[in-house]
Amino acid sequence: MVSKEMYTFEDSEVVELVELRTAAVTYTASLANEAGLVNFSNLVGNFTLAAETAFKAGRIPKTPENQQLLQNLRDLLGTLQIYRYQGDRELSPRAAQIRDSIRRVTFGDVISLRPEATASVCRAYIEHNMQQLPQPVKLYYMGPMFRRERPQKGRYRQFYQIGAEVLGGSDAPAIDAEVIEMVMTFFDRLELQGVQLEINSIGCRDCRPKYVELLRAELLKVKDKLGPDSQRRIETNPLRVLDSKLESEQTIIATLPRIADHLCEECAAHYAAVKHQLEARGVIYRENWRLVRGLDYYMRTTFEITAQGLGSQNAVCGGGRYDGLVELLGGPPTKGIGFAIGEDRLILSLQESGKAPVQQGRDVYIAWMGERAHATAIRAAKDLRKAGFSVELPPMEQKFGKALGQADKLGAKYALILGDNEVSEGLWTLKTLADGSQLKLPEPALIEHLRKSKAVSS
Ligand code: AMP
């Protein structure tokens, strides 16, 4: 999973050690004078003592490495004064050694926030012996994912995915097609606009490495014409060059060898059958030979679905086959295919095309004037909220004109107008903002009226 931008950190309960470590390793004052050296020795001493105590209590990992580092620190600490008298030249390397040892003491497990959930689902399959259930097993998930990417519209560092995986059984092309059909049907029901499905096959462990080598060799021939990112990727992951959006590289990429021409016989047959199965289901697709997935365990079918209104980050769903992954994670050889929908982008696209409410407006805005009306307004807000309405109650008196303007801006359906007259008559005014019509009703009848109209609209 390392090729995704992960949030990785040391999960530690020893906050005080973290602070002591920072103080010791960021101490920059000169060690050439007595005060500087004493301060530094104290900081290192405090850290070492606290770390030794935590080590003995098992609050930091009792590893041989930690033990050794703490021993080193003790020894070095004891000799700091000696180095002091031998001069700066001797002292600086010791101080660097001390800082290095302090940095390397581990305080807890290194953990990562999940960048995606396919691997977690595969682990669940293994852990719960799901290979003993009737195959294939069909699972889904919804939840937050975390990637340290550059945020922009539709690309966040915490975002939500809805995904499904089919694990075990065969790798029949009908499974690939059915999985894709399911997402397309879901998008269709949501009336997502401008939906486009692109598919590709990226081969298997037999044929892909040969293609990658061919691609690398061809890329090396045109290396000078590529940008720095692609130049680097020739070595690290040549397939990713195909992802490049750089204008100047497009004509070069168009001339590169295509994986479809280099699939082994089984992969070519599988790909042809997937396309046939999609056609049998009436699923419209476009082939995109440049569609690849960054991670090694993906194979054969890959797909991506884009939608309108999202700008450059327009993929709402990505998926593919990953037959080797369960085995890679320590389970039995298992077929697998799945997808992840980007929930944030899905909603964004629906909002852009007016298929989802952009912002929830209020049901009722209470426009009140005068102290007596304020008391009534507070009570009305309480009653209406209790009855399930969302209510905006302005904290300060406003002129009615301004209040109604505010109600309109907030997208309120109704304005409840409470002034001196309404309070003394016991008749409240309800204005429907969409058409400007007004009603005067006693309190219970008004709430009943709102309740009925809410039932009709929902
Ligand atoms: P992936 O797991 O990279 O195949 O992504 C699957 C889907 O998740 C994409 O098609 C996007 O809709 C969504 N997605 C991926 N990364 C982000 C992100 N940083 N912010 C919002 N959505 C994302």
Image: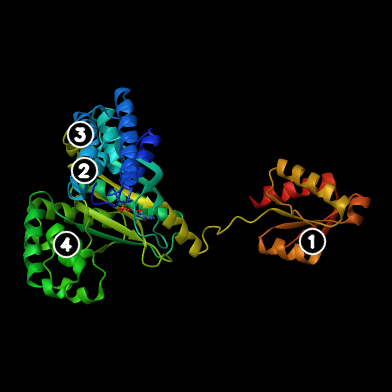
Q: Please, what is the three-letter code of the amino acid marked with disc 4?
A: Arg
In the image: residue 246, left or right of residue 343? left
> Which residue in the protein does label 3 denote?
72
Circle 4 Cα neighbour tier, 10 Å, few/some/many (<14 / 14–19 / ≥20): some
SS for dot 1:
loop
> Which residue in the protein does label 2 denote?
85
Q: In terms of depth relative to the viewer, which is nearer, 180 or 323?
A: 323
Q: Please, what is the three-letter code of the amino acid marked with disc 2?
A: Tyr
Question: Can the viewer see residue 281?
Answer: yes
Q: Position of residue 40 (x, y in %)?
A: 32, 42
SS for dot 3:
helix
Query: What's the distance in space between the residues labelled 2 and 1, CA to CA?
Result: 77 Å
Mark 3 C-beta to ligand 1 under 8 Å: no
> Which residue in the protein does label 1 denote?
398
Write the residue at 55% across / 59% down. 358
Tell which tag, 3 or 1, sits nearer the viewer.
3
Q: Position of residue 273 (x, y in %)?
A: 19, 53
Q: In terms of depth relative to the viewer, which is nearer, 198 or 233?
A: 233
Query: What's the distance in space between the residues labelled 3 and 1, CA to CA?
Result: 71 Å
Which mark identifies residue 164?
Answer: none
Q: Position of residue 181 (x, y in %)?
A: 33, 52
Mark 2 C-beta to ligand 1 under 8 Å: no
Q: Please say if the residues under marks 3 and 4 sit with CB atoms less than 8 Å apart.
A: no
Q: Pick whichever of labels 2 and 1 is earlier in the sequence.
A: 2
Residue 187 occupies quadrant: bottom left
Residue 302 occupies quadrant: bottom left
Q: Please, what is the three-letter code of the amino acid marked with disc 3?
A: Asn
Tell which tag, 3 or 2, sits nearer the viewer.
2
Query: What's the distance in space between the residues labelled 3 and 4, CA to CA?
Result: 41 Å
Circle 1 Cα neighbour tier, 10 Å, few/some/many (<14 / 14–19 / ≥20): some
